[in-house]
Image (cartoon, rainbow, N blue to C red):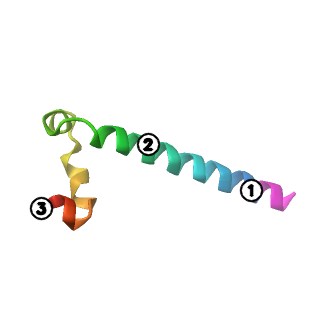
Amino acid sequence: MFILERIGRMAAQYSRARTRYLTERSVRALPVEIQKDIGWPAVQDFRPQAENK
């Protein structure tokens, strides 16, 4: 039973990470003006340095 619980937790963690990735990708595809309107610029700090230039 322990193995099934662990697999279930791993699947849930993967699902949350995948959902977050898809959400971030969708928001980053929006124009910069809209990103600012929804308060997204704070996340730009985590982009790779090459994109910030």
Question: Which residue is tagged 3?
Answer: 53
Q: CA distance from mark 1 to mark 3?
A: 41 Å
Residue at image position (59%, 53%) is 13
Q: Give coordinates of residue 20: x percent, y percent.
A: 45, 46
- Looking at the rendered image, the disc whose residue lies closer to the viewer, 2 or 3, is 3
Write the start and end of the magenta stretch as one range.
Answer: 1-5
Circle nearer the N terminus (1, 3)? 1
**Can residue 3 be found in the magenta stretch?**
yes
Return the mark for residue 49: none
Determine whether, in the image, residue 51 is placed left or right of residue 3: left
- Looking at the rendered image, the disc whose residue lies closer to the viewer, 1 or 3, is 3
Amino acid found under the numbered disc labelled 2: Leu
Q: Residues within 10 Å of mark 2 (few under 14, many from 20)?
A: few
Q: Give coordinates of residue 24: x percent, y percent.
A: 36, 45
**Can residue 10 be found in the magenta stretch?**
no
Give the quarter of the image for residue 38: top left
Number of numbered markers: 3
**In the displayed image of the protein, which residue is found farthest to the right?**
1
Q: Is residue 36 or residue 32 the one in the foreground?
A: 32
- Looking at the rendered image, the disc whose residue lies closer to the viewer, 2 or 1, is 2
Give the quarter of the image for residue 4: bottom right
Location of the N terminus (image quadrant): bottom right
Amino acid found under the numbered disc labelled 1: Ile
- Asked if the residue at tag 1 contacts the one at tag 2, i.e. Cβ–Cβ closer than 8 Å, the answer is no
Question: Which residue is tagged 2?
Answer: 22
Residue at image position (27%, 60%) is 46
Residue at image position (66%, 56%) is 10
Circle nearer the N terminus (2, 3)? 2
Residue at image position (54%, 47%) is 16
Q: CA distance from mark 2 to mark 1?
A: 22 Å
Determine whether, in the image, residue 37 is placed left or right of residue 23: left
Q: CA distance from mark 2 to mark 3?
A: 24 Å
